[in-house]
Amino acid sequence: MTTSGDADGHEWPSAPGDTLLFENERVRVWRMTLEPGGMFDFHQHRHDHVVIWLDGGVSQGQELGDQDWGLVQDAGPGFVLYKTVGTAAPMRPHRIRNDGDRATGHVIVELLEPSPSREEEPWVHNGHGALRRTS
């Protein structure tokens, strides 16, 4: 598993999934599978990426330092999210848990070429679900 450091020198895993499905010089494709109540621990994204929810599900995210699981993804089948991480800094470390009553899976496609943006930008999605902050 690869790691990436933050400003304090802490090394955070940069693998955004539990199974590497494909990799070349331009993209890296991961699968993340979570059983009900299951969690994928803190990790940090360094690349712009696409998240594809195949069957949908409900998950919650928690950013490092937050007390609450303040980000909710209510994904329908085919929910697609895109995140511009930018080149200035990696995303804040975060973790995700399955808040539903059945196993969920999604695919993460990391775009390994430099981001066209210096700064991180908000998530954008295709409308087949919702992404919201609760705190």
Image (cartoon, rainbow, N blue to C red):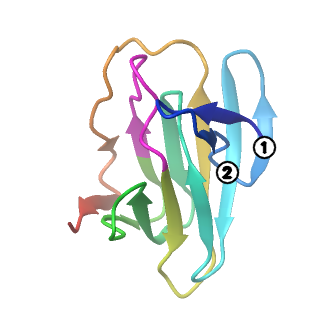
Displayed quadrant of residue 104: bottom right
User: 96 or 113: nearer the eye?
Assistant: 96
Q: Residue 105: in sight, yes or no?
A: no
Q: Amino acid at mark 2?
A: Gly
Q: Residue 125: in sight, yes or no?
A: yes
| Position of residue 108 measured from the top left corner of the image (x, y, whole percent) | 59, 44
- 60 is within the stretch colored magenta: no
- Residue that carries the numbered disc 2 in the rendered image: 17
Answer whether labels 1 and 2 touch (C-beta < 8 Å).
yes
User: 94 or 110: nearer the eye?
Assistant: 94
| Position of residue 130 measured from the top left corner of the image (x, y, whole percent) | 29, 61
Q: Quadrant of the C terminus?
A: bottom left
Residue stretch in magenta: 81-93
Which residue in the rendered view is the most extreme toward the front?
Answer: 8
Which residue in the rendered view is the most extreme toward the left?
Answer: 135
Q: Main secondary structure of the magenta part?
A: loop
